[in-house]
Image (cartoon, rainbow, N blue to C red):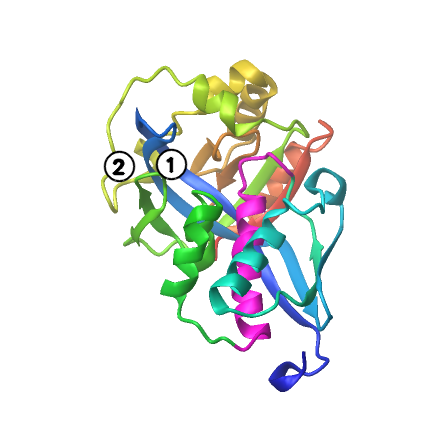
């Protein structure tokens, strides 16, 4: 395909997702859970690029390329096929995903990649669809994909797919991400929830007074999550320490870059994966 894009390589960031809070409310008849969450996104993430091609393909490279996989069920390819089908065009594109986000880590890597594919191919195929049309395609791909399409701090309810604006601007907040290099599958963590509804989230309320209801279940599966949370707390300087999603990645927010850097130094030596970044 030529047109406006010509032979130019286009790129699209896929920011990592954080759940600044995650309150489970009830299990639904369809097997999903009603929940309330505060989504946020980081400057750190994957990157997706595309070049013209006669057919659809995906190459995955980077530190976590192996665990991510590049078969036909990869969410990037599913998103590409869904967009092409909706647009009534052939899915022709050579995609390359630079995989920096750990897999099964509570950072929404697959969802972020799928959302990036929708945004990137919307440009590459010169569709110029508004965000609302992309969101309609995002929802069947996964509960976190709609939030990842916007990649902005927001409040999520329902399955996490009903999105509204979060009234507090958190952009620029320094963040330290810590993963103990243990993959935690989402399904068993949801299954381990005690089904005790501890209340919802008030929009604009203090994040420190909120929680992640999946933490205890994740610790049962991966006890090292408790060690990471304890180490982040002991390092000091954080305004918030919490696990993201179903784990095992934990994070801390800081008032400034110096406090984040000091904590990162304190956590070296464990062999854990660390990323110093900020909210976007």
| Residue displayed at 55% across by 53% down | 114
Q: Main secondary structure of the magenta part?
A: helix
Task: Give the quadrant of residue 152.
Answer: bottom left
Would residue 201 appear left or right of 82 to someone viewing this image? Answer: left
- Give above or below for 255 relative to 252: below
Would residue 188 appear left or right of 39 to someone viewing this image? Answer: right
Task: Give the quadrant of residue 214.
Answer: top left
Residue 255 visible here: no
Q: Residue tagged by mark 2?
A: 201
User: Whole-percent x and y of residue 189?
Assistant: 49, 22
Residue sitting nearer the eye, 165 or 178: 165
Residues under numbered marks 2 and 1 in contact, where contact means CB atoms less than 8 Å apart = yes
- The range drawn in magenta is 103-126
User: Whole-percent x and y of residue 75?
Assistant: 59, 48
User: Whole-percent x and y of residue 91?
Assistant: 62, 65
- Give above or below for 25 relative to 276: above
Residue 182 visible here: yes
Secondary structure beneath disc 2? Answer: loop
User: Whole-percent x and y of residue 228?
Assistant: 58, 26
Q: CA distance from mark 2 to mark 1?
A: 8 Å
Q: Is residue 111 magenta?
A: yes
Q: Residues within 10 Å of mark 1 (few under 14, many from 20)?
A: many
Q: Residues within 10 Å of mark 2 (few under 14, many from 20)?
A: many
| Residue displayed at 55% across by 30% down | 232
Secondary structure beneath disc 1? Answer: strand
Q: Residue tagged by mark 1?
A: 21
Quadrant placement of the N terminus: bottom right
């Amino acid at each position: 395909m030529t047109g406006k894009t010509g032979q130019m390589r286009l790129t699209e960031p896929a920011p990592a997702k954080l759940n600044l809070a995650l309150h489970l409310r009830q299990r639904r008849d369809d097997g999903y859970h009603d929940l309330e969450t505060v989504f946020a996104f980081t400057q750190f993430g994957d990157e997706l690029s595309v070049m013209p091609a006669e057919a659809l393909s995906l190459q995955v490279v980077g530190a976590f390329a192996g665990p991510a996989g590049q078969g036909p069920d990869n969410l990037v390819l599913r998103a590409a096929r869904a967009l092409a089908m909706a647009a009534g065009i052939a899915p022709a594109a050579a995609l390359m995903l630079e995989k920096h986000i750990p897999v099964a880590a509570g950072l929404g890597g697959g969802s972020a990649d799928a959302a990036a594919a929708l945004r990137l191919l919307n440009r590459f195929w010169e569709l110029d669809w508004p965000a609302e049309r992309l969101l309609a395609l995002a929802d069947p791909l996964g509960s976190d994909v709609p939030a990842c399409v916007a990649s902005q701090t927001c409040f999520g309810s329902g399955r996490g797919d009903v999105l509204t604006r979060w009234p507090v601007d958190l952009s620029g907040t320094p963040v330290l991400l810590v993963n103990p290099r243990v993959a935690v599958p989402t399904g068993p963590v949801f299954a381990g929830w005690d089904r005790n509804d501890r209340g919802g989230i008030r929009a604009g309320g203090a994040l420190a007074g909120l929680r992640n209801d999946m933490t205890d279940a994740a610790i049962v599966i991966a006890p090292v999550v408790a060690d990471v949370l304890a180490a982040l707390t002991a390092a000091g300087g954080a305004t918030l320490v919490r696990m993201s999603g179903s784990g095992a990645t934990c994070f801390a927010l800081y008032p400034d870059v110096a406090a984040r850097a000091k904590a990162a130094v304190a956590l070296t030596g464990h062999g854990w994966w660390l990323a110093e970044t900020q909210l976007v």
